[in-house]
Image (cartoon, grey):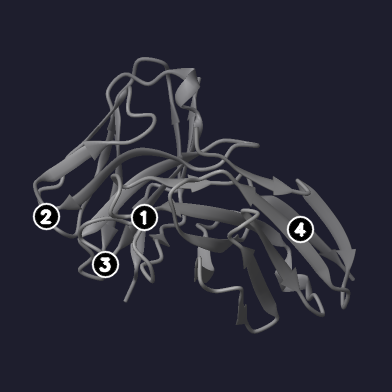
């Protein structure tokens, strides 16, 4: 069964510090990997999408990396701000030519940034 | 554009009651889907639709019905609510008409409906 595991489950950091969130997956065949940010009481919002040929992708202070060989991804947040407090969800897509409409979602990492 | 709009935001039902969760999008997206989000678990797909008149089951379809009579609307019906259906429900859409797994087609989510079944 396809799985996406995220670590840590929760994280508390001080404002201005950096942090890295991890995502390991077993989805095969692989199409792309996405990171979403979900604020409390809101729906997830897309941060980045990467295919197997992309190693790094940035969106402002967010930088995602992908190692398709080891099936690992990370999301690095630089100079954290209070508004970064949210859950971060890793989502992996199967090859769209292979099967239906299945995306596998990780359970998320809940980040709290304290002043 | 309003994006994806879900109503109601909160709902409490008694066991056995039925109700419909509404979802509408104004982006002319072909693909729409319903997910449930439970604590400690990833979002799980309930039903999805690749266009008006076409629906299919996802990972956890039991106890739920959907229909897609227009491109804009994709309501989710709970036939006979059970406590196990207590969850937060998200509707999502994307432009891709064939599969939501395609590159560069991020899902656009609504802000959810928090449902409690007692």
Q: CA distance from mark 4 to mark 2?
A: 38 Å
Mark 1 sits on what residue? Answer: B92
Query: Where does residue B110 sit, x and y in percent of width and height?
Result: 41, 57
Choose mark 4 or mark 3, whichever is in front. Answer: 3
Callout 3: few (<14), some (14-19), or many (20+) C-alpha neighbours within 10 Å? some
Mark nearer the N terminus (1 vs 2): 2
Give a yes or no on whether discs 3 and 1 share a subunit: yes
Chain under callout 3: B
Q: CA distance from mark 2 to mark 3?
A: 15 Å
Q: Does B55 sit left or right of B82 as displayed?
A: left
Mark 3 sits on what residue? Answer: B95
Query: Where does residue B75 sit, x and y in percent of width and height?
Result: 24, 44
Q: Are marks 1 and 4 in contact (CB under 8 Å)?
A: no
Chain under callout 2: B
Callout 2: few (<14), some (14-19), or many (20+) C-alpha neighbours within 10 Å? few
Callout 1: few (<14), some (14-19), or many (20+) C-alpha neighbours within 10 Å? many
Give a yes or no on whether discs 2 and 3 share a subunit: yes
Disc 1, SS:
strand
Q: Nearer the viewer, residue A33 or B87?
A: A33
Chain under callout 4: A
Mark 4 sits on what residue? Answer: A111
């Amino acid at each position: 069964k396809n799985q996406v595991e995220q670590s840590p489950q929760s994280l508390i950091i001080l404002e201005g510090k950096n942090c890295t969130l991890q995502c390991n997956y077993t989805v095969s065949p692989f199409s792309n990997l996405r990171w979403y940010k979900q604020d409390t009481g809101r729906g997830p919002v897309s941060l980045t999408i990467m295919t197997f040929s992309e190693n790094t992708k940035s969106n402002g202070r967010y930088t995602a990396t992908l190692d398709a060989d080891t099936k690992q991804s990370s999301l690095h947040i630089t100079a954290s701000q209070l508004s970064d407090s949210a859950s971060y969800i890793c989502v992996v897509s199967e090859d769209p030519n292979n099967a239906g409409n299945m995306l596998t979602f990780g359970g998320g990492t809940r980040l709290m940034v304290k002043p | 554009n309003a994006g994806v709009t879900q109503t109601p935001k909160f709902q409490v039902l008694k066991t056995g009651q039925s109700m419909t969760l509404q979802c509408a999008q104004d982006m002319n997206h072909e693909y729409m889907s319903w997910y449930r989000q439970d604590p400690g678990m990833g979002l799980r797909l309930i039903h999805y639709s690749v266009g008006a008149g076409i629906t299919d089951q996802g990972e956890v379809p039991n106890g739920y019905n959907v229909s897609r009579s227009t491109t804009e609307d994709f309501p989710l019906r709970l036939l006979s609510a059970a406590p196990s259906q207590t969850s937060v429900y998200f509707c999502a859409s994307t432009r891709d008409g064939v599969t939501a797994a395609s590159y560069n087609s991020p899902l656009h989510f609504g802000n959810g409906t928090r449902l409690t079944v007692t």
